[in-house]
Image: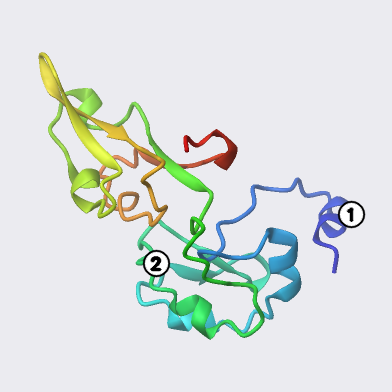
Amino acid sequence: MDVSRRRFLGGRAPGPTPFRPPWSAAEPLFLDRCTRCNDCLKACPTQLLVAGQGGYPEADFSDAHCTLCGDCARVCSTGAIGRDVEQAPWSFGIAIGEGCLAAQNVECRVCGELCDAGAIRFRPRLGGVPLPDVDNTACTGCGACIAPCPVVAIQRVAVNPAQEPS
């Protein structure tokens, strides 16, 4: 079924494209290939993948993160999820908002401690606690920093590959 036509006729405004498993095909191809068998959900060791709208798998970073293990791709027989390690698993990074405890002069480095890629570093500042600095070129999009943030100050943001430095 044409999802955009169904949304038009149903009167619902289209929402943002959900976050699919890492290395998923482009959304139209993903929707065409995915059979909603749930094998990827069962294979995910952190339970990051959940059944979303229409039963299609989505990455839910509210309680889990991605280890980039590739188990979801290994069990996907349709090609909806691949695993090209030469490409970034997702086209998003993170942004840390003003609600961050460090911006409120409260010492907190939870996000940086959990970032295995080293994409979040804390830069010292005079008269205050160090502030987080995000390098989205190093960010894998794993989401390990999102759920543990005590004030929910970390959001996913789209990364435009054309704007990334070479």
Residue visible at 44% across and 44% down? 93
Residue 44's image quarter?
bottom left
Along the horizontal axis of the image, is 107 left or right of 37?
left
Q: Which mark's residue is nearer the viewer, 2 or 1?
A: 2
Q: Is residue 156 above or below residue 61?
A: above
Residue 85: image x %, image y %? 47, 65
Residue at the disc numbered 1: 9
Say what secondary structure mark 1 lies in.
helix
Residue 129's image quarter?
top left
Along the horizontal axis of the image, is 90 left or right of 8?
left
Say what secondary structure mark 2 lies in.
loop
Residue type at mark 1: give it. Leu
Residue visible at 33% across and 36% down? 134
Q: In this view, does 16 lie above or below 65?
A: above
Residue type at mark 2: give it. Leu
Residue visible at 17% across and 41% down? 109
